[in-house]
Image: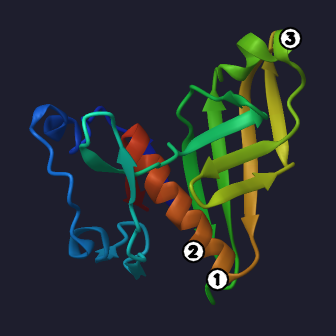
Amino acid sequence: MATLHSLALSSPFSSSLHKPRSYSVPCSIVHQSTNSSFNGQTLRMPCLRLRMVTQSSDMQMPVMMMLKPKIQFIQGTDEQTIPDVRLTKSRDGTNGMAIFTFDQPSVFDSSGEIGDITGFYMIDEEGVLQSVDVNAKFVNGKPSIIEAKYIMRSPREWDRFMRFMERYSNANGLQFIKK
């Protein structure tokens, strides 16, 4: 079993935000093999084609649109609480399960105003992974914990989930710990 834990780390990109930027992005920087810290497999990322935006000053610069990975219980409302995540995988690697535990999730603060919890949605630039296996735990009659399960039934679904988790963990300071 593996677990992701929250860490207070700054993004490696935050220090580069105040430096002058070069607007030409060589394909070799964008296209590279990256070792996933989750399963050790090599990921191949396609070369991104950057669209040039013309400004009134005749300066051209590429625009890269990257969607921050997020989790939602009500579509359109991002969950602010960072979950604890437990992963299991079958011995033959054909299927697995991720169990997300949210302690005092922010969805309880807004669900009365916005609507009911409709599922568990993991959203990134590749699309949406979703599950309806969502359970709330109550303490003294008030909701306190949400547990959501996401089941992966093929190696392809496992790889797609791991790509989402890599993006989500990088954006939210999670660390992978193998037990």
Q: Position of residue 162 (x, y in %)?
A: 53, 65
User: In the figure, is residue 98 to the left or right of 22?
Assistant: right
Element on which disc 3 rests: helix
**Residue found 75% across the figure and 13% down from its top:** 110
Give the spatial CA distance, label 3 vs label 1.
38 Å
Q: Is residue 87 above or below residue 83?
A: below
Q: Image quarter for residue 89?
A: bottom right
Residue under numbered circle 3: 112
Amino acid identity at mark 1: Pro
Classify mark 2: residues with Cα within 10 Å, few (<14), some (14-19) or many (20+): some
- The disc, 2 or 3, on the residue closer to the chain's N-terminal end is 3
Residue under numbered circle 1: 155
Element on which disc 1 rests: helix
Classify mark 1: residues with Cα within 10 Å, few (<14), some (14-19) or many (20+): some
Marks 1 and 2: in contact by CB < 8 Å?
Answer: yes
User: In the figure, is residue 45 to the left or right of 85?
Assistant: left
Q: Image quarter for residue 160?
A: bottom right
Q: Position of residue 132 (x, y in %)?
A: 87, 48
Residue under numbered circle 2: 159
User: In the figure, is residue 108 to the left or right of 173?
Assistant: right
Classify mark 3: residues with Cα within 10 Å, few (<14), some (14-19) or many (20+): few
Quadrant of the rendering where the C terminus is positioned: bottom left
Q: Position of residue 43 (x, y in %)?
A: 41, 78
Disc number for residue 165? none
